[in-house]
Image (spheres, helix red, strand yellow):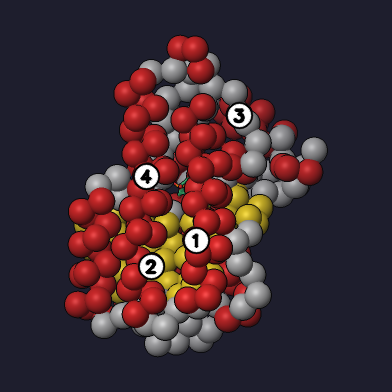
Amino acid sequence: GALTDKVAIVTGAASGIGRAVALAYAREGAKVVVSDISVGGGEETVKLITDAGGTAYFVAADTSKAEDSDRLVRQTMEQFGALHIACNNAGIGGPSAPTGEYPVEGWDKVIAINLSGVFYGCRYQIPAMLQAGGGVIVNMASILGQVGFANSVAYVAAKHGVVGITKNIALEYAAGGIRANAVGPAFINTPLLKDMDSDTINWLVSKHPIGRLGEANEVAELVLWLSTDKASFVNGAYYAVDGGYLAS
Ligand code: NAD
């Protein structure tokens, strides 16, 4: 496979897009560290990988805690001896309210997981990748890392921030052999959208020229490609996977 002998961390890998990325990495031969706060879902992802003949290991970690992100990298090194690839994917949606009424605790939580969590991940992954002679980071942004979305100020700010973190890493570590890119999915059919009613879903669908929401594996294929040597000249960029959402 394209990732044979590589060691990869995927955060938020108990569900949705993260699970699809973990499965895609494993299919291409990577040893995958599946990480999440959800133990049951994480172990289920490991089982899906090992049942398919792949190699995976679960580490429970909360991305919003720097010490968990540090421990995740250390446990990866202990288990598989190196770190080459990281997909910083864990994220939440957060409350829905206009900015002047946005719950401050909601802001703090979304920023802690969706923005600080990505920084903490990169902060500890980069030294391990330098030790391996290089690596690849794929940070999970969103179309909302490029445009606004009413009633979602914390999510929009965090995802714009993820794009910024990614650009900085590209500048700082290209010479060290690390490539970093951000992926921007439009609305994807995952448990993240589970609280939306059918009217909201239909309205969301109408914003995608392709006429449907995306599927987790359609995001995973882009993440996979960015993580392989086929993307050797791709660095510091933002790639939408959005059925045309941003084209309008
Ligand atoms: P999901 O809810 O299916 O999966 C998210 C996973 O992250 C869950 O397993 C959850 O337990 C985990 N998680 C939450 N908080 C965590 C924490 N503090 N530490 C570790 N793990 C934590 O959602 P998804 O749709 O697969 O979302 C994955 C990523 O894709 C998120 O960053 C999300 O913002 C982004 N995204 C999703 C969509 C979409 O429409 N579904 C669109 C654009 C971007």
- Percent x, y for residue 97? 49, 18
Q: Residue furthest right?
A: 248
Say which element carries label 2.
helix
Q: Which mark is residue 126?
A: 2
> Identity of the amino acid at label 1?
Ile
- Percent x, y for residue 123? 35, 59
**Upstream in sequence: badge 3 or badge 1:** 3
- Return the residue at label 4: 116
Say which element carries label 3.
loop
- Percent x, y for residue 176? 47, 76
Q: Residue at x 59, y 72 (%)?
A: 225
> Identity of the amino acid at label 4?
Ser
Q: Is residue 133 left or right of residue 78?
A: right
Q: Nearer the viewer, residue 79 or 176?
A: 176
Q: Nearer the viewer, residue 55 or 235?
A: 235
**Upstream in sequence: badge 4 or badge 3:** 4
Q: Residue at x 39, y 59 (%)?
A: 122
Q: Which mark is residue 149?
A: 3
Q: Which mark is residue 169?
A: 1
